[in-house]
Image (cartoon, rainbow, N blue to C red):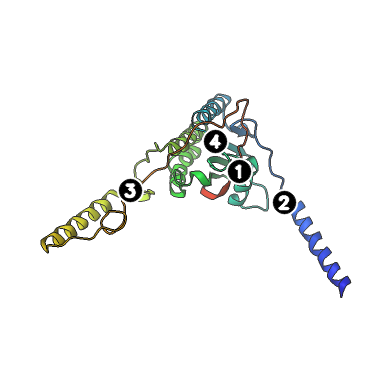
């Protein structure tokens, strides 16, 4: 019985080792904030974008990278691969997890914004999806590679700063509450308060001090401090990723 158990264990270990060996190797961390193994961007655009992302890290502390590959490795999904790469590059600061990577895979025509744990409030999935849909994908489809990638990276930076302004159609596709719905809710609340006052009572305040106990919602990210930059090129700070972000195809 014991020889059979040992043989089974050896087979499991052999299978696991073979499966691990079959996994594609992760690319090494880049030396700069823009990694383009294909020459997809012009030298001028690459230099401009790299300088802007370096300056952003100096001022803000958060790390934003752009990574352009020829194709997605065989045998992996887009989301699985980009999360593993972002983790291995250690994008973002440790314990703050404030890293973002914009991935582009040319042969597959796939794109993804991979967002670290700490920025999922400033750059939630719907906002990342909107940036892809409204900024990156239209430019890629028309051949404006430089303009599309530059504008997308700048939109990501603006979102981290809490300054991103969505384009037209935000009420239909946005990650916020449509204006008409806010107005309708305000009318309903006003009617309830008026009716309660006429009855001589009033709606009770909850523990938070707001009617019904619910404080008004807050929108946006923010709260990021500077520091963490050592100069001399990109160096990962130990950030973590949990699968937040958005994907697209052009």
* Real-space Cα separation, disc 2 to disc 4, in angstroms: 27 Å
Q: Secondary structure at mark 4?
A: strand
Q: Earlier in the sequence, mark 1 or mark 3?
A: 1
Mark 2 highlights which residue? 23
Mark 3 highlights which residue? 171
Q: Residue furthest front?
A: 207
Residue 72 position, x and y percent, is 64, 46
Residue 227 position, x and y percent, is 53, 31
Q: Is any part of residue 22 visible from this angle?
A: yes
Q: Secondary structure at mark 2?
A: loop
| Residue 102: numbered disc | none
* Real-space Cα separation, disc 1 to disc 3, in angstroms: 32 Å
Q: Earlier in the sequence, mark 1 or mark 2?
A: 2
Mark 4 highlights which residue? 63
Find out whether the residues at labels 1 and 3 contact each other: C-beta distance under 8 Å: no
Bin the neighbour count of mark 2 within 10 Å (Cα to Cα): few under 14, some 14-19, many 20 and up: few
Q: Is any part of residue 249 visible from this angle?
A: no
Find out whether the residues at labels 4 and 1 contact each other: C-beta distance under 8 Å: no
Mark 1 highlights which residue? 86
| Between marks 3 and 4 in the image, the one whose residue lies nearer the viewer | 4
Nearest the viewer among 176 and 122 is 122
């Amino acid at each position: 019985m014991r020889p059979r158990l040992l043989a089974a264990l050896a087979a499991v270990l052999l299978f696991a080792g073979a499966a691990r060996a079959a996994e594609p190797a992760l690319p090494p961390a880049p030396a700069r904030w823009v990694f383009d193994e294909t020459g997809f961007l012009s030298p001028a655009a690459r230099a401009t974008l790299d300088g802007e992302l370096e300056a952003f890290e100096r001022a803000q502390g958060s790390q934003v990278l752009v990574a352009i590959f020829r194709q997605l490795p065989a045998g992996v999904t887009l989301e699985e691969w980009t999360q593993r790469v972002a983790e291995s590059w250690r994008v973002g600061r440790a314990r703050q997890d404030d890293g973002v990577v914009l991935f582009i895979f040319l042969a597959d025509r796939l794109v993804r914004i991979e967002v670290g744990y700490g920025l999922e409030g400033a750059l939630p999935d719907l906002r990342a999806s909107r940036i892809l849909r409204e900024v990156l994908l239209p430019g890629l489809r028309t051949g404006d590679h430089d303009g599309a990638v530059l504008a997308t990276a700048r939109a990501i930076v603006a979102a981290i700063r809490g300054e991103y302004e969505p384009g037209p159609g935000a009420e239909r596709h946005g990650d916020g509450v449509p204006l008409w719905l806010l107005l309708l809710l305000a009318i309903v609340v006003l009617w309830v308060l008026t009716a309660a006052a006429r009855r001589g009572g009033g709606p009770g305040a909850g523990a938070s001090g707001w009617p019904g106990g619910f404080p008004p919602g807050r929108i946006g990210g923010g709260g990021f401090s500077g520091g963490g930059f050592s100069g001399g090129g990109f160096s990962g700070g130990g950030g973590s990723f949990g699968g937040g972000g958005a994907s697209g195809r052009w």
